[in-house]
Image: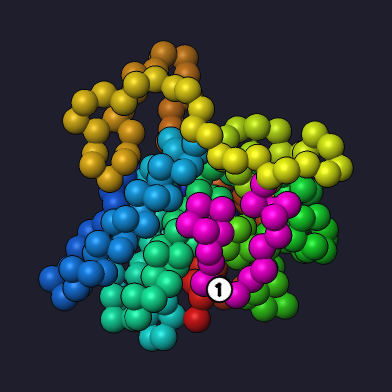
Amino acid sequence: MRSWMTLLVLGMISSLVVAPAAASADSPAVPTEVTSIVATAYDEWFDSLGVRQTCSSSVTITYEQLDGRRGEYRTETGQVVIDPTDTTSGMAAIVVHELSHHTFLACGAFADGDFTTAFYAAQDLPDDRDWFDYATGWSATPAEHFAEAMAVTIHGAGEGGIPVTEETTALVSRWLAGAPTTPPAVAHDPVPYASPAGPEVASGAAETGGPAPVATEPTQPTQETKLAASVVELAARTSLSVLSLTRGRIQGPM
């Protein structure tokens, strides 16, 4: 996919690199029921990320009235924003959906050609439509299909009304587990998500499920470098023609 606005790319690089890892930043007006739903949804999302945990960790959740929108992801700050005045029905699915926009960008799903091809086929999306092409509407945008597919795969249900096929949930499960994105046969059962073996989490890790820092060899690229590279790759592959993203926001279900 094609080019992106340089200014937005630079803004995304700085926000993704510096955004702290946290489950939520509460405001005094947020009901306890809402913070409980959001914290539980965050843990459900993070615990299901498999090999995508590290690249997804730099995200925050904040609360704000959104004029009828239920949630949104802000690329310039790496923040998910939830409207605490909205109904709590379906709120957990909204949280997972918006967090999944961060995973999509920070983990570079857009840069995986095999995954893109398989995902578009599974969701019956036109192969010439860019991930962030909102021209035909929110529910026809591939990036929104990805976030909704993550919600269905992780939470068991979405809230945006985008149909998600069993083939898609199987594909997303394989992607989270780090397995090949293409199925081993034309017909196969969905692959259940299984957390891959990895280093033990050190004591004192955040209660939200975030991983404790792990020392790396000096020659290993830093997380900041990987995130910056992902954003640059997105700029090279994705054209952006919608105002919601040029403002640095990906709007959630209305």
Residue closer to the observer: 190 or 32:
190
Is residue 136 positioned above or below 96 on the image?
Answer: below
Q: Is residue 153 shown in magenta?
A: yes
Horizontally, residue 70 falls left or right of residue 151, namely left
Protein image colouring = rainbow
Q: Amino acid at mark 1?
A: Gly
Residue 162 falls in image quadrant: bottom right
Image position of 21 (left or right of 13): left
Residue 42 in view of the camera: yes
Estimate how packed mark 1 is, as few (under 14), some (14 to 19) or many (20 or more) residues with alpha carbons within 10 Å.
many
249 versus 226 height, above or below: below
Residue 127 position, x and y percent, is 82, 58
Percent across and percent down for residue 83 are 33, 75
Identify which residue, 70 or 3, lies in the foreground. 70
55, 122: nearer the viewer: 122
Task: Specify start and end residues of the magenta stretch as a single range.
Answer: 150-170
Q: Residue furthest left?
A: 28
Task: Label 1, secondary structure: give it.
Answer: loop
Q: Which residue is mark 1?
A: 160
Percent x, y of residue 73: 44, 64
Q: Is residue 89 left or right of residue 109?
A: left
Residue at 35% over, 49% down: 43
- 120 vs 6, left or right, is right
Instruction: Inspect the magenta stretch and tell me whether residue 48 lies in it.
Output: no
Residue furthest right as drawn: 186
